[in-house]
Amino acid sequence: MKLDLHVHIRRHYRLADIRRAVKAAGLDGIAITNFHNVTFAQYLRERIDDFLIIVGQEVESSAGHILAINIEEKIPDDLEPGETIRRIHAQGGAAILAHPYLGWNSILPHGRAQQLPFDAVEAFNYRAGPMLYPNFLAKIGLRNLPWPKVANTDSKELATIGLCYNEVSVKPAPLYTAKTTEEMIPAVLRCVRQGQIRRREERQRPNWNWFGANVSHFLFPQNYYRCFYCGDKIVFKICRRRYACVKCGRREARNMRCVRGHYVCSICRTKIAFETPEFLAYREQLERSSHVE
Ligand SMILES: [Zn+2]
Ligand SMILES: [Zn+2]
Ligand SMILES: [Zn+2]
């Protein structure tokens, strides 16, 4: 099975788009590790059966980010790393040290961290890639440490899911019902804990395509955004001006407008982005279970 074990899924993404992205990446499963929340991953697991969904969370421990893989109850943030891992294990989950060398939100795997009972460490993190040093340091610094190593994307956009992944020798299922999911996860976790993983990160070494895409995003932002009002192209100006929002009339100083002169303010843009049937249904379900977040 091919698995990306660190994926953030935004709450307004459409189910069809999530499905398409994971299938296009050729993955058999993902662990959904949003911050501060497991209910959205549970919501998706109930509705998606064409790949394995492992419910998880990226926990902000007092010393850095820890991935909790296969949990059902939210783990509180800001606990000591040792206590965070204890709570993950108490739920039968696996604790993975996320992006160990990513400065301010990581636990450097030296000294005390070495004594912590992590199940695995993220030796490669796609999002840390552009900075070059975290993955490079991980290559060197983790060489002699005993933890099994995984490669995850830490995707926040659907397009990057699966750009690196882990292969474990568990047979994929034709359909991931609640029953098959429950049966397969222990086998997957066993592979992770025992280090029976092939990390596939070759698609993600810094390369000219990647560099070109970043430069082009910076130089030609108009190719990447569309008007939220009419769908036409956006033009970027050098100087900011105050524009009135076509939706609510609020005025904001910005340097972009669509070619027809529409401006939609940041508040209205967020509102529109979240008006998907998926988000409204999720919201309704939360309210019904009086679990509003
Ligand atoms: Zn993180
Ligand atoms: Zn993350
Ligand atoms: Zn507005």
Image (cartoon, grey):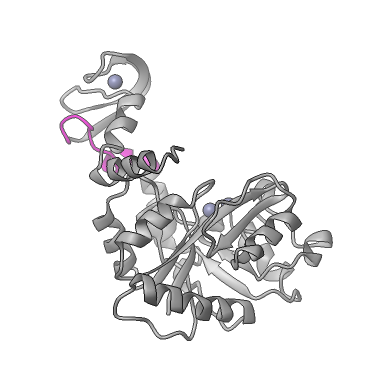
Q: Is residue 91 visible?
A: yes
Which quadrant does the N terminus fall into?
Answer: bottom left
Q: Residue furthest right?
A: 111
* Magenta-highlighted residues: 218-231
**Residue sitting at x 68%, y 46%:** 104
Q: Quadrant of residue 52?
A: bottom left
Q: How far from the left and from the top, in percent, is residue 208?
A: 43, 61
Q: Nearer the viewer, residue 252 or 105?
A: 105
Q: Quadrant of residue 51?
A: bottom left
Q: How far from the left and from the top, in percent, is residue 10?
A: 39, 47
Q: Is residue 95 above or below residue 81?
A: below
Q: How far from the left and from the top, in percent, is residue 279?
A: 31, 43
Q: Nearer the viewer, residue 196 or 186?
A: 186
Does residue 216 appear left or right of residue 125 in this picture?
left
Q: Is residue 199 visible?
A: no
**Residue sitting at x 60%, y 51%:** 75
Does residue 33 appear left or right of residue 66 in this picture?
left
Magenta stretch holds residue 221: yes
Does residue 38 appear left or right of residue 247 in this picture?
right
Q: Is residue 57 above or below residue 187?
A: above
Query: How would you classify the magenta stretch by its main secondary structure?
Result: loop
Q: Is residue 66 above or below residue 234?
A: below
Q: Ligand 3 lies in which image quarter?
A: top left
**Residue sitting at x 34%, y 73%:** 176
Q: How far from the left and from the top, in percent, is residue 117?
A: 74, 68
Number of marks? 0
Magenta stretch holds residue 11: no
Does residue 163 appear left or right of residue 60 in this picture?
left
**Residue sitting at x 37%, y 61%:** 45
